[in-house]
Image: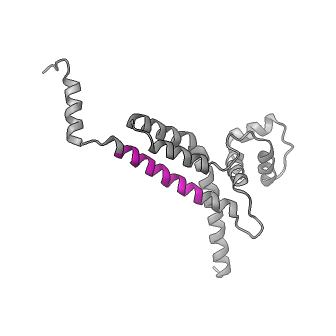
Amino acid sequence: MPATFGDFEKGCEALGAELDFNPKQMVHVLADHMDRVIDYQDTCLGVVADGVYVGDQVSRDQAVIDSQAWTIAFTDVGKTFARDKAWSGGTVGGFVDWLKENYPFRVKIDPIPSWRKQVARLRAKANPHVALANYQSFMDVTAELRDAIESSAASAEAEIDRLIDERRGK
């Protein structure tokens, strides 16, 4: 049966009416998820900044750079950068320290305050299409940094667990 002009639009309207779509609710759901993602990142960044050992504490800004440096150190991007900038060689820790000083990291400060402003702007959106685009952009743009911070926090937590087990004689 061939469709007639306007059938697609009528079908979309019928589907929308049946689903009882609420654009304002969608915006709030997206913003709530962003809030949870940011809260988790805030916690992870705190773990990295607090360090594992007494005296290992660093600023949150430094923790952001440390997380990125450790992540990039083991990639082709990091190795190519080192070769192109004539890194003199040494230990892995030395390489990471060198990256911290020389690599042009995109994010050099604690992103949490900026991210919280972004979620507040998202909550103010009336158009669900714009809200979804902003949400998706945030998730895409921050993915690498969020992964780096989570990885650093997981390493710190694993070391803490190892130390606890060691103290317990395991």
Give 40 or 113, whichever is nearer the viewer: 113
Left or right, 137 with respect to 166, comes to left
75 versus 84 height, above or below: below
Residue in the image at 35% along x and 46% along y: 25
Question: Does the stretch in magenta take in 35?
Answer: yes
The quadrant of the picture occupied by the N terminus is top left
User: Percent x, y for residue 29?
Assistant: 39, 49
Q: Residue at the far bottom: name it.
A: 169
- Which of the 4 image quarters holds residue 156? bottom right
Given the current orientation, which residue lies at the most extreme right position? 88
Q: Position of residue 41 (x, y in %)?
A: 57, 55
Most frequent secondary structure within the magenta stretch: helix
- Residue in the image at 39% along x and 34% along y: 129
Instruction: Relative to 61, say whether 167 is above or below.
Output: below
Q: According to the image, what is the colour scheme of the structure?
A: one colour
Q: Nearer the viewer, residue 119 or 49?
A: 119
Residue 128, given in percent of the width and then of the height, sits at: 38, 37
**Quadrant location of the C terminus in the rendered image:** bottom right
- Name the residue rendered at 40%, 44% in the picture: 27
What residue span does the magenta drawing correspond to? 25-43
- Identify the residue at horizontal 23%, vertical 25% (top origin): 9
Q: Is residue 60 magenta?
A: no
Where is residue 165, by image quadrant?
bottom right
Drawn side of residue 124 relative to residue 13, left or right? right
Residue 33 point in image, percent of width and height? 45, 51
- Number of callouts: 0
**Front-most of residues 62 and 121:** 121
